[in-house]
Image (tube, coloured by chain):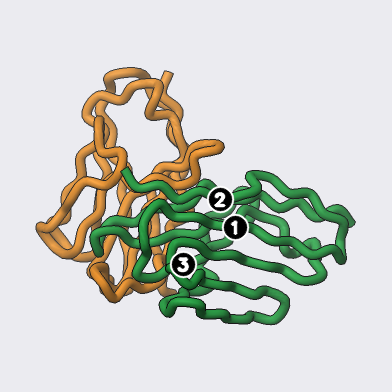
Amino acid sequence: GQQVMQIPQYQHVQEGEDFTTYCNSSTTLSNIQWYKQRPGGHPVFLIQLVKSGEVKKQKRLTFQFGEAKKNSSLHITATQTTDVGTYFCAGPYAGNQFYFGTGTSLTVIP
Amino acid sequence: EAQVTQNPRYLITVTGKKLTVTCSQNMNHEYMSWYRQDPGLGLRQIYYSMNVEVTDKGDVPEGYKVSRKEKRNFPLILESPSPNQTSLYFCASSPSGGILTYEQYFGPGTRLTVT
């Protein structure tokens, strides 16, 4: 089946350091979504990217969609303890089915 | 309040005892989906539904059934649960599926343990 891989699987950073997670799809995506899941919580939608090469920013978070629409990244500048959680990318396949990445668990050390 | 609800939130059961996890959304969403979350594997889609009476298999449908008789409800049925179905389950809904995908709203999750 389709594969959506994310690296790294885990990341520990000191508060104030930057963080990046990368998402790679085995096939081209029509769009990509990013979700955040706090410990013990449920995934919450962050953003959707649609266009090739698209870059979107939300305060300290920067999202990129690759030119080939097969990869994406999420970069957090100057992490805070509120950024703790697992970040997932997700994309639709065959229009209706959704594949989530394996997730990157972020720990922020105060 | 717009939300997706799931019941029960926690369930411990024994192998072979049929169970149903309910899911309901109050946002008039057409698309609904079930996922299971396991460590290191992310979320994997079990079944999804584009609209009432329209359901289809996701990536890991074996051992599960669903139905969509009403737009708001999308129950997940395990006819004969086995220990490998021990997992955290999430229901999600979205205004629509297809090419124009929208954000998915997730329920709080159901932690199932099968002994």
**Left or right of residue B47, residue B90 in this image:** right
The C terminus of chain B: image quadrant? top left
Percent across and percent down for residue B8 are: 40, 43
User: Circle 2 marks a residue in which chain?
Assistant: A
Q: Nearer the viewer, mark 3 or mark 2?
A: 2
In the depicted view, which residue is nearer to us: B69 or A29?
A: A29
Which residue in the structure is indicated by mark 3?
A33
Identify whether B4 is placed above or below A62: above
User: Circle 1 marks a residue in which chain?
Assistant: A
How would you rate the neighbour count of disc 1 (Cα within 10 Å): few for under 14, some for 14-19, many for 20 or more?
many
Mark 3 or mark 2: which comes first in sequence?
2
Q: Amino acid at mark 3?
A: Gln
Asked if the residue under mark 1 is in contact with the one under mark 2, i.e. CB atoms within 8 Å, the reply is yes
Identify whether B50 is placed above or below B61: below
* Alpha carbon distance from label 3 to label 1: 13 Å
Asked which secondary structure carries label 3, the reply is strand
**Left or right of residue B74, residue B84 in this image:** right
Identify whether A80 is placed above or below B63: below
**Residue at 80% of width from left, 55% of height from top?**
A108
**Residue at 50% of width from left, 68% of height from top?**
A45
Q: Which mark is residue A22?
A: 1
Quarter of the image holding residue B36? top left
Chain letter for orange, please. Answer: B
- Chain A display color: green
Which residue in the structure is indicated by mark 2?
A6
* Alpha carbon distance from label 3 to label 2: 13 Å
- Same chain for the residues under marks 3 and 2 in the image: yes
